Amino acid sequence: MMKTTLRTRRSTQDILPAINERFSPRAFSDREVTDEELDLLFEAARWAPSSMNEQPWRFLVVRKGGEGHGALLSCLSPKNASWADKAPVLIVNMVMRDLSRNGQPNHHARHDLGLALGQFTAQATELGMGLHLLGGFNAEATRQAFQIPETLDIVCVTVLGFPGDPDQLPEDLRARELVRSARKPLSELVHKGRFHG
Ligand SMILES: Cc1cc2nc3c(=O)[nH]c(=O)nc-3n(C[C@H](O)[C@H](O)[C@H](O)COP(=O)(O)O)c2cc1C
């Protein structure tokens, strides 16, 4: 178990603030995300690189109190749903499975979605928003609830809003909200010149 530090980190190096200030919140404020703000995040995602410029990413957006919100919430794991219901926006992140040019499987589709989500996330952080990605949801139930065709893979869910007061959370989640997760050292991740085990 890696150690976490209390609201300090992130990197001590001079990396971009939109990278360094990001964390995955569970407490969200009542502040709305406007259509303009949301469009700007998708615009940032749109300019990500992708294999053969296929742009396989697709997004399904629901808003708190709007069409589909209850349906998507009920597809999240109960633990995730217990805090995600406060956030103003939920997004299902998907990819087109096959290449449009020849119908063959696109083995880079999920990779490319990750790049697009990275840009989405950096833009959101720059605007003071917080977002939390989720793998803890039922993809098949989501497919059925929204009639999502089999040509799309359903990859993860984004919980989006503005970070809120940690005191609104139950004690176990509040404690987690107050720490920032650690990272492995570069020496474990980066191999220079030759691969060392
Ligand atoms: C694809 C993906 C799936 C995740 N699934 C969940 C989840 O189901 N529930 C949750 O609370 N956090 C989830 N997380 C958040 C990670 O636990 C979090 O990013 C990681 O612990 C690092 O913390 P940080 O984002 O605050 O730096 C997920 C993150 C990613 C990228």
Image (cartoon, rainbow, N blue to C red):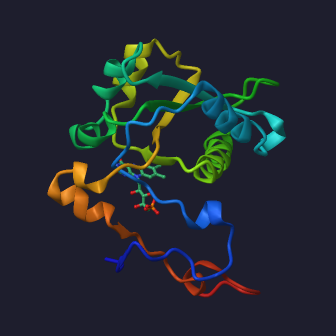
Q: Residue at x 61, y 42 (%)?
A: 110
Q: Residue at x 23, y 54 (%)?
A: 167
In this view, the residue in front, 74 or 26, is: 26
Residue 47 at what x, y percent from top left?
A: 78, 40
The image quadrant of residue 54 is top right
Residue 39 at what x, y percent from top left?
A: 66, 30
Q: Is residue 118 above or below residue 189?
A: above
**Seen in the image, is 65 located left or right of residue 101?**
left
Q: Quadrant of ligand 1?
A: bottom left
Q: Give the quadrant of the N terminus.
A: bottom left
The image quadrant of residue 106 is top right
**Seen in the image, is 139 located left or right of residue 195?**
left
Residue 113 at what x, y percent from top left?
A: 63, 41
In this view, the residue in front, 61 or 64, is: 64
Q: Is residue 36 above or below residue 16?
A: above
The image quadrant of residue 197 is bottom right
Residue 52 at what x, y percent from top left?
A: 83, 39
